[in-house]
Amino acid sequence: MLTKKEQRLRRARQTRIRIAGQGVARLTVNRTNLHIYASVISGDGGKVLATASTAEVAVRTELGGSGKGGNVAAAQIIGKRLAEKAKAVGVEKVAFDRAGFAYHGRVKALADAAREAGLQF
């Protein structure tokens, strides 16, 4: 019997196989209880082009200190921030890799904010 983490990683592996065949940049999301992390990775998977997380000092001050990075509002800030960074390096189109997490709550909020800020996926 697989643990909850093993099930999530199994789902993530299948998604990454599908995305690798497309050859486009990948927006990947990881969430913990306290923070949410997002990265844009090149199409070949060899280089991280842009990152954003609630662990960054600028984001933490915007959120009002520690312990505020695990909510939907924080995820929206990270989605917008990541889209701006990705567009600055010339990435307009990405494939969304939710890393096996359900497309709900913070993951959905991050994706919607990134779309509103101009990323296409």
Image (cartoon, helix red, strand yellow):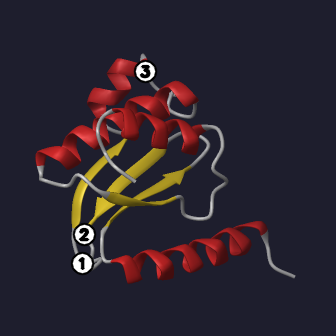
As drawn, 103 above or below 15: above
- Kind of residue at disc 3: Gly
- Provide the secondary structure element on which disc 1 rests: loop
The label nearer to you, 1 versus 2, is 2
> Looking at the picture, which amino acid does disc 1 mark?
Gly
Q: Is residue 54 visible?
A: no
Q: Is residue 113 visible?
A: yes
Q: Nearer the viewer, residue 78 or 56?
A: 78
Query: Which residue in the structure is indicated by mark 3?
Result: 65
User: Which one is closest to the eye, mark 3 or mark 1?
Assistant: 1
Whole-percent x, y for residue 65 in the image: 43, 21
Q: Position of residue 10 (x, y in %)?
A: 65, 78
For label 3, count other residues whose C-alpha is less than 10 Å away and answer few (under 14), some (14-19) or many (20+).
Answer: few
Q: Given contact means CB atoms under 8 Å apart, are the residues at marks 1 and 2 in contact? A: yes
Q: Please tell me which of labels 2 and 3 falls first in the chain.
A: 2
Q: State which quadrant residue 45 falls in.
A: bottom left
Quarter holding the C terminus is: bottom left
Q: State the residue at coordinates (37%, 33%).
A: 116
Residue for badge 2: 42
Q: Residues within 10 Å of mark 1 (few under 14, many from 20)?
A: few
The answer to whether the residue labelled 3 contacts the one labelled 1, judged by CB atoms less than 8 Å apart, is no
According to the picture, the residue beneath numbered tag 1 turns out to be 46
Considering only vertical position in the picture, is 50 above or below 2? above
Q: Residue lying at the far top in this picture: please name it.
A: 64
**Residue type, mark 2 in image:** Ser
